[in-house]
């Protein structure tokens, strides 16, 4: 079952990530994909500013092994024509879900001989995909599910999710939230999302991770834009005799709580350590039906 079908038929979906910057050969990528396959509905293929296996190539490799890929496409690295070609190529391969983003600007890019493209905006590219989905003669019967990114924060009472609404109007079907370990903030944020009726237009997916150590948790909080890692999570990892096991338990607890938050359609797990920790956390959480 593809991710887009799981969103329509399951009460709670589970996905995970393979960061393409970690892979330089097909065997390792497929091997890790197969570790995740039994416990997730799809695998995100995330890009970085470094040289790595291309998203389309990685998707093709995973599809050969019946692993559903969610391909990330950013406007930093390609102009509009290249993005459009990649999207049509992805559809031809059998990809049914993508995440569209602006992409983080490469700092010191000029010094490295790298150019930030930004030929088009994420909203414009989403709108183009929406047009492709509606044009029966382009990819008949192959609608592409489009994802957008957003950060979780504690909103004021007057806040309205205007940016997310614009993304939905441009064609976003699901929203991938940034990593959040603060469930009080998550519940406050989702209350406003539900009140704005945004959940009628898009599926909301929250993100957590199996943290292997307090040092990794601290680095994520200080270096990843929008990542919310409270002090009590870091302190719990510091006190643990086995931090990696504690990180799995923390992730499992959070997954159970996330499933209880109104308006949330699923959870996505980042992999920050041993790939085996992801299925371990999912199994410990009990959020998957037998």
Image: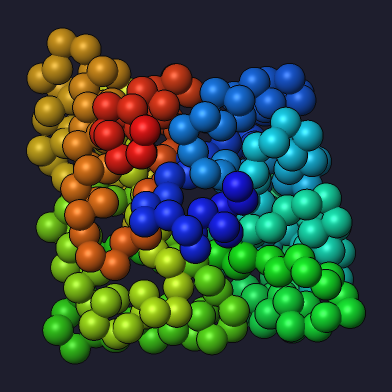
**Image quadrant assignment for residue 244:** top left
**Image quadrant assignment for residue 276:** top left
Q: Residue furthest front?
A: 290
Tell me: residue 275, above or below residue 122: above
Tell me: residue 170, above or below residue 32: below
Who is closer to the viewer here, 155 or 106?
155
Who is closer to the viewer here, 68 or 208?
68
The answer to whether residue 125 of the structure is visible from this angle is yes
Q: Where does the image place residue 258, in percent across and percent down from the top left?
A: 24, 51
Q: Residue furthest top?
A: 241
Judge left or right: residue 176 versus residue 23.
left
The answer to whether residue 53 of the structure is visible from this angle is no
Q: Where does the image place residue 181, in percent across and percent down from the top left?
A: 23, 46
Q: Residue at x 76, y 23 (%)?
A: 25
Judge left or right: residue 107 versus residue 274.
right
Q: Residue at x 67, y 27 (%)?
A: 29
Q: Residue at x 15, y 22 (%)?
A: 238
Tell me: residue 213, above or below residue 116: above
**Image quadrant assignment for residue 141:** bottom right
Judge left or right: residue 66 versus residue 225.
right
How are the residues colored? rainbow
Q: Where does the image place residue 232, in percent across and percent down from the top left?
A: 10, 38
Q: Residue at x 73, y 20 (%)?
A: 27
Judge left or right: residue 252 versus residue 145.
left
**Quadrant holding the C terminus:** top left
Who is closer to the viewer here, 243 or 282?
282
């Amino acid at each position: 079952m593809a991710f887009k079908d799981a969103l329509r038929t399951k009460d709670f979906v589970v996905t995970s990530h393979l960061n393409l910057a970690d892979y330089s050969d097909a065997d390792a990528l497929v091997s890790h994909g197969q570790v995740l396959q039994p416990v997730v509905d799809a695998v995100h293929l995330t890009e970085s500013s470094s040289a790595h296996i291309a998203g389309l190539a990685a998707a093709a490799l995973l599809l050969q092994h019946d692993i559903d890929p969610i391909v990330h496409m950013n406007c930093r690295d390609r102009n509009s024509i290249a993005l459009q070609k990649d999207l049509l190529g992805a559809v031809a391969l059998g990809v049914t879900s993508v995440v569209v983003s602006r992409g983080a600007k490469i700092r010191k890019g000029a010094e490295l001989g790298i150019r930030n493209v930004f030929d088009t905006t994420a909203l414009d590219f989403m709108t183009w995909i929406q047009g492709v989905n509606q044009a029966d003669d382009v990819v008949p019967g192959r609608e592409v599910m489009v994802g957008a990114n957003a950060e979780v924060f504690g909103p004021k009472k007057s806040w309205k999710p205007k940016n997310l609404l614009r993304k939905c109007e441009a064609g976003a079907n699901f929203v991938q939230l940034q990593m959040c370990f603060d469930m009080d903030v998550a519940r406050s944020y989702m209350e406003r999302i539900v009140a704005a009726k945004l959940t009628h237009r898009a599926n909301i997916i929250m993100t957590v991770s199996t943290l292997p150590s307090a040092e990794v948790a601290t680095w994520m909080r200080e270096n990843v834009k929008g990542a919310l890692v409270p002090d009590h999570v870091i302190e719990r990892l510091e006190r643990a005799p086995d931090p990696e096991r504690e990180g799995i338990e923390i992730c499992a607890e959070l997954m159970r709580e996330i499933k209880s938050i109104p308006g949330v359609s699923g959870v996505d797990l980042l992999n920050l350590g041993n790939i085996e920790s992801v299925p371990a956390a999912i199994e410990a959480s009990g959020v998957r039906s037998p």
